[in-house]
Amino acid sequence: MAFLGIGALVGGGLFGAAVDFAVTAAVSIGISYAAQALAGKPAATTTDASFSTQGQLTFGGTVARCALFGYCATAGSLAYANTWGTSDDGKTPNAYITQVIALSDIPVAGLQGVWVNGQKCTLGTLDSEKGYAITEYNKAAKDYLWVKFYDGTQTTADGLCVNKVASTDRPYEATRVATGCAYAVCTALVEDTLYTGIPQFRFEIQGAKLYDITKDDTAGGSGDQRWSDPSTWGGDGDNLPAVQIYNILRGINYNGAWFYGLQNVTGAKLPYVSWSQAINKCRATVTGLDGLEPQYRTGGQINISAQVADTVQAILTGCQGRLSEVGGSYKLHVGEPDGFSASFTDDDILSTEEQSFSPFFGLSESINGISGNYPEPAEGWASKPAPDLYSAAFEAEDGNRRLMAAVQYDFVPYSEQVQRLMLSALNEARRARQHTIVLPPEYWPVEPGDFVSWTSERNGYTDKLFRVDGTTDKANLDVIVVLTEVDPSDYDWDHGDYQPPTLGQVGVIRVPAQGVLAWGANGYTLVDKDGFTRRPAIQLSWDGDVPGIVGVQYELAHENPATDEWITIDRNRTDQVAAGALIIWNGLLPDEPYRVRGQYIPNTPRDMLWSDWIDVTTPNVKLSLADFDAALHAQVTQIQDQLNEQLNEITQRIAAIAANQDARNWLDKQTIRTQLTSRSDAAFAGIDEVRTVATDTQVAFASFQTTVTAQFGTVNASITTNSTAIATLNGYAAAQYSVTLNVNGYATGFNLLNGGSGTSAFIVVSDKFQVQQPGYNGSAPLSVFTIGTNASGPAIGISGNLYLDGTITARMMNVGTLSAITANVGTLTAGTIQSASGKMVMNLTAGTLIISD
């Protein structure tokens, strides 16, 4: 197909055999000779070269040398690798791995970007040894990946590799400067949640600096570039296909040594007029995705094993280019038709010579649709199909058949340029009119690649443009010319016709950091086997039905009152995830504020988030009687019984119903209230009585309360009695009777509770509690049992015999004076034993016995 450039052969079938051979020879000399010369062999190239982006790192064996042109990408080839160093905590040996990756065998302009594991990354802070940190591999303000780049002009070896990475079995000498080669040094620090293996890199490169003849004022251009001085090369021309092909034809050299391309083509064989026109057409701006951009740009990796003809062909595909060779000179034609170099009419054609005309293609040669693949930078430079281009009109002309052609745009990493090329290629491929004619000698200057204008009454042409695809001189100096119709409108492009490609997801797919679900904490009370409260605790809770989790860890913090800082006092974990709860208690203080947070532990390395800190206060559970010596336990058992939680439940249930009885939706409720009052100046006396009964489907409730009040000025006294009974649907019943005496805010009284068997109590609040026998000792009853206070504090007094049988048995007795008629106390420990008459004193401490008269 003509739009592919080199090797586009056309011919007629209406000539006799001799003329047909001559025309074919003419075309072969005019067009295909270039392919033969570039390939270095007499026949057309047969190499099936591929110039797609090298996406995988190559290593081992013989790796082809390469050059990078324009904006492109490569994974490079591995030149050296080693593990070294330890982690920051000094616990992990060989914590780093460093790779030296060769990118180009000639210097390049610079590094444009880095992809890691399929993700476009950002170059961050510069480390003097390891290079630029990769921002996407920074975790918890710590870097884990670095890249250092050398463009090929370096004069010393990499210091990190020489001084730290090198080992005895894997040396890296200071002589490994690699001047002329562009390479990268990539260093990774082990981190299980960031890497699943050794990081894979792809580097975006601005390729070699090239010579641009239009920037050389000694060669016809404008600028200070010189072919003889590569240090002056480089600029926007590095991305232009015409500049790239020019350099390949003249030969790529480095340090005076040939590297790639032709070796014996001088500047004289590449006429300035032709090449400057092609370069400027590539440089001409069109509207693109980011505003104005050059019309044609190309870039890619060239392996020196590739045939030069194949390389040039791949670059020509990126600019609708055609290369011709006439008389040893190479001319380049790109894009839409240039102005015509000659014009003629039917009268100029030698009618005595045979002519050939092909008005249309055969079905096997027809194309009415085109598909293309190109490297897409946004998808990690993977080869991507451009939107297929169809034409309903062309398909109708071909009998409603869809006839597709596929083109590889390996050197065009620009999606809109690819679509422009596809449109012009399809339109140009539909130009079926081909003529072979003979013109007189004055048309001898016409060369392959030129454009001519033909006005033909016979064919209906008016200044119609044709491309000269081949010429040959006859013996009589007449010229055989092979023409193919062209039309500048084939290259018309409207930016609004651009179809943005559908981009797939690229980059590393990391599982998002996961937080602990339903994390909670609340105060908890530990009780013993008898139901007594013993220790304050904290109950942790979480969602235990989460896949991929093997444990839960927590941190407990306590406030330092001196600094108002929270200090972590405990770290621990549990593997019983499914339990969903854990009680911690060891060392916790009662009625103290704490903070606690939690985190899941995954079954494979990945990031997990700590929960927020939760404030929690422990219950006010202090040491009980059970925590003291067993000897004291017997003396205070009755007091500890008063702390039974069942008694608290009675009061709480009765109080809750009584407090909410006004708001409860009773099915039946009745209340009777009576008041009797007397007031005189500062004196007030009153009796208030409230009777309430209420029922619903859950509770029966009855209450009778009286309040007797006397007040004079600021002095007041009151007596409140309260009788309450409840019964509930679930079989619970309780009764309470209390009397409260209040004098100027000082309250005493008693409270009777009964919640059923084993849950009753009689609680007295009083300065002194006495049990007296009525009718005994005349008008002065004797207190049998008294609770009160003495000089040393609370005390219990018992009058008369302790037990009815007249004996006392005790495991321990500690008294100041012991008097008894008969006493069998087992072992008696005392300081002094004295007889009742005082005449015998035994001092056990001093070891003396005194008997007096």
Image (spheres, grey):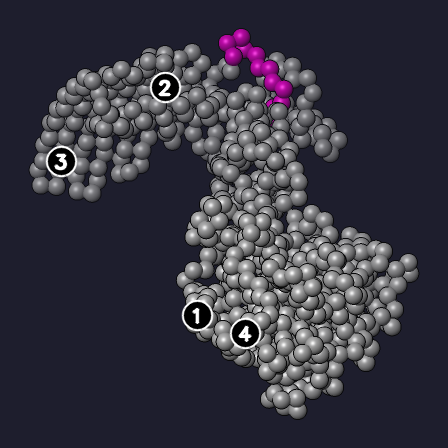
Q: Front-most of 663 and 517? A: 517
Question: Would you name the residue on which mark 2 appears?
Answer: 753
The quarter of the image holding the C terminus is top right
> Residue tagged by mark 3?
684
Residue 349, which numbered label? 4
- Circles 2, 3 touching at the beta carbon (< 8 Å): no
Q: Which residue lies at the image location 75% right of the left edge and 75% below the top edge?
A: 251
Decide: few, some or many residues near mark 2? Use Cα within 10 Å; few <14, some 14-19, many ≥20: many
Magenta-highlighted residues: 803-816
Left or right of 720? Residue 387 is: right
Task: From the image, tell me which residue sits under label 1.
Answer: 457
What is the spatial separation of the Cα atoms under label 2 and label 3, in whole angstroms? Answer: 33 Å
Q: Amino acid at mark 3?
A: Phe
Pick whichever of labels 2 and 3 is earlier in the sequence.
3
- Asked whether, in this view, residue 686 is left or right of residue 155, the answer is left
Q: Bin the neighbour count of mark 3 within 10 Å (Cα to Cα): few under 14, some 14-19, many 20 and up.
A: some
Under mark 4, the amino acid is: Ile
Is residue 434 toward the left or the right of residue 115 in the image? left
Query: Mark 1 is on which residue type?
Result: Glu
Front-lying residue, 791 or 289: 289
Mark nearer the viewer, 2 or 3: 2
